[in-house]
Structures are given as structure tokens and as C-alpha cells.
């Protein structure tokens, strides 16, 4: 009999949510066959079975939040009899507490609203009940349950920011920090603390600040729930737009040198590498070189300072069948030639679509490329991947007439492959001249480099 535990899916990951079991009790499972899917705060991953045998017991149901190292199921030998499946039992379920004696204290004072905060300490009764009464019926991880119990909090009064409104450890710790700092939910009007008070208040209660109106649902309308990746993408996009003053700078690029090399080598490339030679690795190679000349674009914003990174770790935005977007990271792009960059981009894109990424594949990015050009876009304004300071959109390349000048200065019209590069950047980090000069450097590299020598 072997225990299957929640794996460590990344250096900073401590827990995850079981989103799907691919095997039931009594099913045979082979080693390395996909057993279950888990969702963390960074990525959804399909986890293979570390052993072969028969699933005899499932200890964590779909939707349960589990910690790294927690036993999720047991797999026995082929002839092992399946054990009875314990119904989702997250732990010894507390017996229904007969409602903490709220009636005996007939004092007419606490009448404003049903806010059973333990702070006013109306009577010594609430000491008996904090844990069972406040977490009963909620799906909480053991760590979150313990934090709520140890600090006498009421889970019903905590706004969850996790999957499906689930309360996370961060939600509870923020409430504890606010209480420790003495920030009660009733900030009167201490004018001097204007810059600090709003920040603390926002941390404690993020939800009510900017609520969009609820749309009316007609009889023939369809309500489509957002999946996990879509929810997290939405949260990140809203946060990014509210954090960075976004500016767009765009530049047209003549890709004719790149196109000539692509046409000449695309057949042999496909036969050797197994995938097509696109514009993206050429652009990634040029961007990596340009970032060496303009290092403040290869940076992260840190409040009152800029962290300029030594390595160029390029995040590549990957669409997942129109269901969401992830940006896995190709590490050390500036130390690689075009062929290796193309292989690495293909690798992370493939693993993204087959749910084989780990959270570490999504961390450490210093600059992001998003490639909408495959759909023929003219130009798009992308949103910065925080805490980075810039993101480059590679838009559609089309054949169009351009003015060319020969070695004697004579001008003529020719048909070339032309496209736009659109850079969204954070105006806190640098100014327009710096961003424009960076784009101009990328343009220069793409239009003048000997790509024939590079591709060999």
C-alpha cells in the first residue's frame, strides 16, 4: 500500500486545490499515468501517479484545499481490496454547537448590525465557541482553520479571495496584521494619517471598494462561470492597470531580411526540428540583445526603486484554447542563439497547453512577449505582466509596398514583409525617449542582422 501525497509544485507553493480526479476507487492506475489535477495560485497541473496499482482510498475530494505533503489517496497492489471511501471528511467534524448563548445577555447595547466581532467583549461567553462555531460548514485548509481558531476570528466575517471565494492563509494573516496594528474597521477621521490609513483599510476589506453593477440575465442569456485561469487572469489584469501608468509606443518593422531566410530554410528546419520556423524566435533574439543596451526595460518596479535584472528571462504569453492565458518563462534568453530560443519557446508553449508546467516555469520572468500576430493583428495594446515594467506585442506581418533606397540613394517601390511591434511600458520606470530608443534598436537588429549566419 502506498500513500500518494500532494507534491511540491514550486518553491513558494504550500497548498493547492484538487480540481479533478481522473481515477475512482477500484480503478487501476499505471505509474506516471495522470491521477488528479491540482490548482495552485500560479498554475493548474495534472499530476501523474508515482506508483502503479489500484486506487483503494481517496482522502481528498474535488474542491478540497490540501497542503504540500498531505495524503490524497492510497494505491495498493492489483489484488488489494478497495477500502470504503470515507465521505469527504476534512477532519473530525465538530458536532453542531447549539448556537452560542446570544440570548441570555439582554443588554440593549449591541444592536447596530449582526457583527459578532469579539472586540467589544460584551460578555465572557464567546470564549467557548470561536473555533467550532466560526468554521463549521466551511471548506478550509488545516492551516487556515488553525489560524482562525488561534486568533478567535469569525470565518463568516472574512472575505475570501481564493478559488470560489475560499478563505486563504493570506486573507486571515491580513486580518490579524490589521488587528495587531490597532486598525479597527471604524477609522474615524484622523486626517494626518491619510496616506497610510487607506492602504490598511484596502488590505482589510478589498471587495466593497469598486463593485461593478450586476448585469441583468435575460431568459435566453447564458451564464458562463469563469474557470480558474480566467479568474486569475482577470484579477492580475485589473491589478496591473491600477498599478502601472501604461503607455503605448509602436514602431513598424521591415522583416524582409528575416522573411528571406525563413523562406530559404523553412523546409529543412521543419524536417530537423519538427516545428515551423516563425517570426517569434527572431524577435525574441533581437529583444534579448536590445535589452542589454537598454537594461531598465529588463526590470521590475519595487515601490521607490527599480530592480534591474542581470539575466534576461523572457515570459511568452500562451493562449490555452481561448480558455485563458499563461506566460511561461524561457530562462537566460540572452545567452542563447536563435535555434535554441525557438526550441525553448516551442517546449514551454507545448507544456502549457498540456498542463505540464510547474509554478517555477511561471516565475522569474523579467520581460514579456505576447504574440497576437498569428491572427493578423495590426497593433494591440497589451497589459504589463507585473512586477515587470514592459511587455512587447508582436503583431501581424503582411506583404505591402515600401520605399527602398539603393546604395546610390535612389528610391523605388518594393513589396516587403512588414509588421508592427507595440510596446506597453510603465511610465514610472522611464520616459518615452528611452522606450522609443529601445524599439528603434530592435527594429535595427531585425532589419540589418545577417540572419543567414545566425540560423546555421
Image (cartoon, helix red, strand yellow):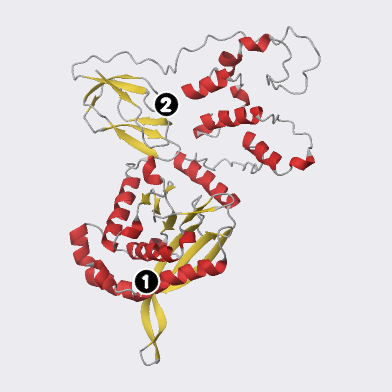
Up-down: is 294 above or below 207? Answer: below
Q: Which residue is mark 1?
A: 446
Q: Residues within 10 Å of mark 2 (few under 14, many from 20)?
A: many
Rounded to the nearest whole Å, what is the CA distance between mark 2 and mark 1? 48 Å
| Residue 99: percent from left, percent from top | 63, 10
- Foreground tag (2 vs 1): 1
Q: Is residue 29 left or right of residue 208?
A: left
Residue 402 location (% of width, % of height): 41, 81
Question: Between 160 and 335, which is closer to the camera in this rendering?
Answer: 335
Of the two numbered discs 2 and 1 on the same chain, state the one appearing first in sequence. 2
Residue 268: numbered disc: none
Numbered disc total: 2
Q: Which residue is mark 2?
A: 66
The answer to which image quadrant residue 172 occupies is top right
Q: Does 110 sit left or right of 431 as displayed?
A: right
Locate residue 4: give its quadrant: top left
Q: Nearer the viewer, residue 26 or 150?
A: 150
At a point 51% along the width and 33% down the height, the residue shown is 164
Image check: 393 left or right of 338? right
Above or below, comparing residue 19 to residue 92 in the picture? below
Amino acid at each position: 500500500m502506498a500513500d500518494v501525497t500532494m507534491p511540491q509544485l514550486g518553491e513558494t507553493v504550500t497548498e493547492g486545490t484538487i480540481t479533478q480526479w481522473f481515477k475512482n476507487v477500484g480503478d487501476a492506475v499505471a505509474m506516471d499515468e495522470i491521477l488528479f489535477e491540482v490548482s495552485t495560485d500560479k498554475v493548474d497541473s495534472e499530476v501523474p501517479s508515482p506508483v502503479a496499482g489500484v486506487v483503494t482510498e481517496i482522502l481528498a475530494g474535488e474542491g478540497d484545499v490540501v497542503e504540500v505533503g498531505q495524503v490524497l489517496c492510497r494505491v495498493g497492489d492489483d489484488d488489494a481490496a478497495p477500502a470504503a471511501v470515507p465521505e469527504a471528511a476534512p477532519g473530525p467534524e465538530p458536532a453542531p454547537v447549539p448556537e452560542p448563548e446570544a440570548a441570555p445577555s439582554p443588554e440593549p447595547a449591541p444592536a447596530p448590525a449582526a457583527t459578532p466581532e469579539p472586540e467589544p467583549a460584551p460578555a465572557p461567553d464567546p470564549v467557548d465557541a470561536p473555533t467550532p462555531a466560526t468554521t463549521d460548514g466551511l471548506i478550509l485548509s488545516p492551516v487556515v482553520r488553525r489560524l482562525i481558531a488561534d486568533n478567535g476570528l469569525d470565518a463568516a466575517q472574512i472575505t475570501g479571495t481564493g478559488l470560489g471565494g475560499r478563505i486563504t492563509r493570506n486573507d486571515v494573516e491580513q486580518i490579524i496584521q490589521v488587528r495587531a496594528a490597532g486598525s479597527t474597521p471604524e477609522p474615524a477621521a484622523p486626517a494626518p494619517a491619510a496616506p497610510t490609513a487607506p492602504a490598511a483599510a484596502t488590505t482589510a476589506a478589498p471587495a466593497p471598494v469598486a463593485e461593478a453593477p450586476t448585469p441583468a440575465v435575460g431568459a435566453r442569456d447564458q451564464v458562463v462561470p469563469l474557470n480558474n485561469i480566467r479568474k486569475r487572469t482577470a484579477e492580475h489584469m485589473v491589478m496591473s492597470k491600477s498599478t502601472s501608468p501604461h503607455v503605448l509606443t509602436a514602431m513598424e518593422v521591415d522583416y524582409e531580411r528575416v522573411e528571406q531566410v525563413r523562406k530559404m530554410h523553412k523546409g529543412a528546419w521543419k524536417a530537423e526540428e519538427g516545428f515551423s520556423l516563425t517570426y517569434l524566435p527572431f524577435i525574441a533574439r533581437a529583444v534579448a540583445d536590445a535589452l542589454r543596451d537598454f537594461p531598465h526595460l529588463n526590470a521590475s518596479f519595487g515601490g521607490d526603486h527599480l530592480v534591474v535584472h542581470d539575466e534576461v528571462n523572457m515570459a511568452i504569453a500562451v493562449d490555452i484554447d481561448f480558455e485563458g492565458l499563461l506566460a511561461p518563462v524561457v530562462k537566460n534568453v540572452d545567452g542563447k542563439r536563435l535555434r535554441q530560443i525557438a526550441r525553448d519557446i516551442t517546449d514551454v508553449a507545448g507544456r502549457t497547453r498540456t498542463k505540464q508546467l510547474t509554478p517555477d516555469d511561471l516565475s522569474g520572468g523579467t520581460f514579456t512577449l505576447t504574440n497576437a500576430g498569428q491572427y493578423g493583428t495590426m497593433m494591440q495594446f497589451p497589459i504589463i505582466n507585473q512586477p515587470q515594467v514592459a511587455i512587447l506585442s508582436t503583431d501581424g506581418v503582411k506583404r505591402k509596398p515600401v520605399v527602398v533606397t539603393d546604395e546610390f540613394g535612389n528610391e523605388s517601390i518594393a513589396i516587403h514583409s512588414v509588421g508592427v511591434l507595440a510596446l506597453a511600458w510603465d511610465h514610472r520606470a522611464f520616459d518615452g525617449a528611452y522606450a522609443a530608443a529601445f524599439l528603434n534598436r530592435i527594429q535595427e537588429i531585425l532589419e540589418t542582422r545577417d540572419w543567414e549566419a545566425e540560423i546555421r
